[in-house]
Each structure stands twice: as C-alpha cells, then as structure tokens.
Amino acid sequence: MTALLRATGLVKSFGDREVLRGVDVSLDAHEVVALIGASGSGKSTLLRCLNLLEPIDDGQIFLGDEDISDPRVDANRVRARFGAVFQAYNLFPHLSVLDNVTLAARVVHGMPRAAAEERAMALLGRIGLADKAREHPDRLSGGQQQRTAIVRAIATDPEVLLLDEITSALDPELVGEVLELVRELAADGATILMATHEMAFARDVADRVVFLDAGAIVEQGPPAALFGAAREPRTREFLARFTA
Ligand code: ADP
Ligand code: MG
C-alpha cells in the first residue's frame, strides 16, 4: 500500500537552528496520526512544511503520486489539497461565518456560490451553527469558532487534514465539543495528522502516535503500545509529565 502523504528526510532550519533534523513521516488514507512532543520540538514546523507553508531545506514530500516538494510545483494548488486548522485566530474576523466557510471553495476551487453555500449550510447544521451563518466570528464562543474553522477546512474535501493544537487556546469546558467533531471526522474516514497535547484523545482516536523530540522522530506506534509501553526513555519521560 502506498501512503497518501509521505515525507522523507525532511530538514528545516531557521537561521542556523535546525528545527527538523531528517524527519520521515507518512500517512495512509483514512489514517489518524497524533503528533506529540514538547513545545518547541518542531510539530508546527513539520505540519507547515508538509503543506508547503514553509520551504524545506532538504528531503522530499509526496502527496499521492506527486512530489510536492519539487520546486516547480505550484504551492497554492498543492495547499488546496490540504485542510489546515491552527491553534487560534483561524477565521477571518471581517467575514460572516458562512463566507468564512465558503471562501476557499469559491475562490480557490471555483465552486459556484449557491453550491458552496448549500454545502456550507449543511456542514454548519451538522455542528449546530446554521443559525450563526450570517454572524461574524466574534459572536461565537471559542469552541464554536474552532468547530467552524474545522468545517471550513473540510468544506473543500481536502485529501489530508492537518490540525495543529486546535484546542490549546480554548477554555477547558470548550475542548470537548471540538474534539468530538474531530472524532466524528475520523470515524467518517478522514485522513488526519494532528499535533496535540490531548493525550487521552490521542490514545482514543489515533491509529498511530508519533513522538517528536528536538526535530526528530524518537518513536512511533499504535497508541496502546506508545502510551502503555514506550521503548525509548525520552518518550517515557515526556509521557510521564502528562500522567502526573
Ligand atoms: P512546536 O510546534 O512543537 O512547539 P515549532 O515547530 O513551533 O514547535 O518550533 C520549533 C522550533 O522552531 C522552535 O525553537 C521555534 O522557536 C522555532 N521556530 C518556529 N518557527 C520559526 C520561525 N518562523 N522563525 C524562527 N524560528 C522558528
Ligand atoms: Mg506548535
């Protein structure tokens, strides 16, 4: 089986600081992979390199059969095949919820407004926010905003969904509703790579957990193996901080 997304030997530096030091990571279709690691270990940089938001210094990235790390590739076209949600500030504050959700579908994918809005309303209805479609994002709670950002990310039917600590800026009581939506997308067969500190969620939902330390993958495996019986001392040390 060939991976849907496969990166090999990824190297990325900021100035003389090497932030990714030869990362190999792959994602099969419909697989949910949790990327864990301390703050500063390179999780966000890895996600941003994978969808070409950051140029890499070395390595290769394949999406399907295409070498998307080829410098001749049109990065905007490739990025449109991904959905991405970040920690916070995902929505455009000056656009309505509906326009936020439909923008990429209309502008990037050329979907007619009526079709884009029909799909957007169905997605907003699914997360219980159809009645907020004409509001601006500042009228939504943080959890509603993040769920809208997720819905916006899937509105274009992306091949891969990249989620970067999407609950870490939320008040604790709002985390559950956002994770529940991710759980549903996973159950629906989405292909997801998510950087997260929600270990219980990763254990529950991920097919595989990847532990990144100082820009390198130290260990990866099924959640039960990694959380239950990590082989590497660095992994155990990191995980111990979450079970204290
Ligand atoms: P994580 O998401 O795991 O917390 P990041 O990928 O954000 O880690 O950061 C990894 C390292 O790269 C950190 O030392 C961070 O300071 C550095 N870094 C990230 N983005 C930039 C940038 N645009 N310019 C310079 N350094 C950066
Ligand atoms: Mg980060």
Image: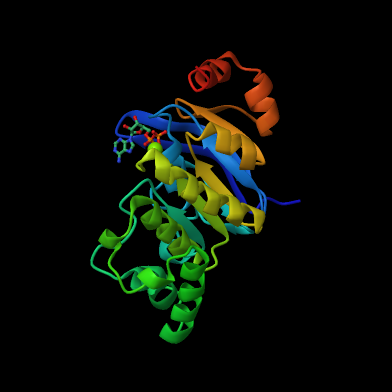
Q: Quadrant of ligand 1?
A: top left
**Nearer to us in this view, 1 or 204:** 204
Q: Is residue 40 above or below residue 69?
A: above
The one nearer the camera, 194 or 107, is: 194
Image x and y of residue 78, in percent:
48, 62
Kindly tell me whether residue 8 is visible in this rendering: yes
In the displayed orientation, state which residue is furthest to the right: 1
User: Can you tell which quarter of the image residue 100 is in?
Assistant: bottom left
Residue furthest to the left in view is: 94
Q: Is residue 76 above or below residue 214?
A: below
Image x and y of residue 125, in percent: 49, 70
**Side (left or right) of 80 relative to 5:** left
Please state the horizontal and vertical placement of residue 232, each as a whole percent of the image: 61, 17
Query: What is the image's colouring?
Result: rainbow
Is 106 positioned to the left or the right of 81 in the image?
left
Residue at the (63%, 58%) spot, across then down: 64
Quarter of image, res 222: top right
Q: Taking the image as drawn, is residue 166 in sight?
A: no
Relative height, residue 175 to residue 216 (above, below): below
Q: Position of residue 176 (x, y in %)?
A: 49, 45
Q: How many marks?
A: 0
The residue closer to the viewer here, 199 or 49, is: 199
> Could you tell me which residue is drawn at 30 percent across and 52 percent down?
89
Return the residue nearer the eye: 21 or 148: 148
